[in-house]
């Protein structure tokens, strides 16, 4: 084999290696082969030059907890999602549109880009590294609970801090028997997995009501709060609000009601 051939083989090997690593870093990309992607560095460069519009497609609760500074919020759950994004595109026809959510384990960025592509809008991208990666790379362009991210160690909730608040069902049930404890079901009316066995006197307050009507009013801060959602994901965002409003004594049911009831039904 000649020198040129060896060099070419080496280059191909490197490219293949990079491709494999890239696929492992973003495993869901294989399920959305028609979606275009944008990297953190490219998106930041275009955003700084006002050549990109960034759209957060998560819930309002997640957006208010942490989001990319100056990003727009258009939840993918909105019935008007396509029309709302189409209006933004028409007003910014020379710019790319990048959708983001909670990073590589979240599919909403892909699904949003695909929805818009299927609706005929081609200049759309998934920023699938999402807000976790952005907050690490560009903290000064990240907003956490209404404030610029200046101290990630204090403002961001780490996986280890979150895990300290997770308890299994047996521990949850034992704590619930304490007279100084309040159990709160924050599932919304669409989620109907049923009641947790052996748990009495549960307050049912959907998350979008619980935050403004309970947490923001600093209610029952002298009690232990035991909180559960459907699958144990929404409570991480709730933790930002509990922390911000000064709650100290609270725990979440690990993996939510679904882990206990072994079913996930919706009305």
Image (tube, rainbow, N blue to C red):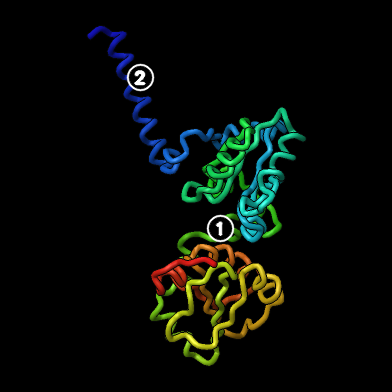
Q: Which quadrant is home to the N terminus?
A: top left
Is disc 1 placed on a helix, strand or loop?
A: helix
Q: Position of residue 119 (x, y in %)?
A: 62, 37
Name which residue lies at 38% across and 40% down. Answer: 24
Name which residue lies at 57% across and 49% down. Answer: 101
Q: Which quadrant is home to the C terminus?
A: bottom right
Q: Mark 2 near mark 1, Cβ–Cβ under 8 Å?
A: no
**As drawn, which residue projects farthest toward the front?**
267
Q: Mark 2 points at which residue?
A: 11
Q: Using the image, tell me which numbered label, if any, was put on residue 117.
A: none
| Other residues around mark 2 within 10 Å, as few (<14) / some (14–19) / many (≥20) | few
Image quadrant assignment for residue 60: bottom right
CA gap between label 2 and label 1 equals 40 Å
Query: Reading the chain from its start, which is encountered first: label 2 or label 1?
Result: 2
Q: Position of residue 202 (x, y in %)?
A: 55, 83
Is disc 2 placed on a helix, strand or loop?
A: helix
Name the side, left or right, on which 181 lies relative to 67. left
Q: Position of residue 97 (x, y in %)?
A: 65, 36
Q: Which of 86 and 231 is in front in this view?
A: 86
Name the side, left or right, on which 65 lies relative to 201. right
Q: Nearer the viewer, residue 115 or 207?
A: 115
Name the side, left or right, on which 93 lies relative to 262. right
Viewer can see residue 150: no
Q: Mark 1 points at which residue?
A: 153
**As drawn, which residue projects farthest toward the bottom?**
179
Name which residue lies at 65% across and 55% down. Answer: 63
Name the side, left or right, on which 62 lies relative to 166. right
Q: Nearer the viewer, residue 230 or 169?
A: 230
């Amino acid at each position: 084999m000649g020198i040129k051939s060896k060099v070419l083989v080496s280059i191909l090997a490197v490219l293949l290696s990079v491709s494999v690593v890239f696929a492992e870093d973003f495993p869901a990309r294989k399920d959305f082969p028609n979606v275009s992607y944008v990297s953190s560095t490219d998106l930041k460069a275009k955003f700084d030059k006002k050549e990109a519009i960034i759209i957060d497609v998560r819930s309002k609760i997640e957006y208010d907890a942490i989001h990319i500074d100056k990003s727009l919020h258009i939840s993918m759950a909105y019935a008007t999602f396509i029309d709302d994004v189409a209006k933004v595109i028409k007003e910014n026809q020379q710019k790319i549109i990048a959708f983001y959510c909670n990073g590589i384990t979240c599919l909403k960025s892909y699904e949003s880009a695909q929805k818009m592509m299927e609706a005929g809008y081609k200049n759309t991208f998934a920023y699938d590294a999402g807000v976790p990666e952005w907050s690490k790379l560009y903290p000064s362009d990240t907003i956490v609970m209404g404030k610029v991210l200046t101290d990630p160690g204090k403002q961001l909730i780490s996986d280890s801090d979150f895990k300290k608040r997770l308890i299994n069902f047996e521990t949850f049930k034992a704590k619930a028997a304490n007279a100084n404890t309040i159990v709160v079901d924050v599932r919304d009316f669409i989620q109907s997995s049923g009641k947790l066995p052996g748990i009495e006197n549960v307050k049912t307050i959907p998350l979008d009501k619980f935050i403004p009507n309970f947490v923001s009013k600093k209610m029952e801060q002298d009690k232990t709060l035991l909180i559960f959602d459907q699958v144990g994901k929404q409570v991480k965002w709730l933790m930002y609000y509990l922390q911000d409003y000064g709650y100290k004594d609270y725990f979440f049911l690990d993996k939510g009601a679904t882990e206990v009831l072994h079913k996930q039904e919706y009305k």
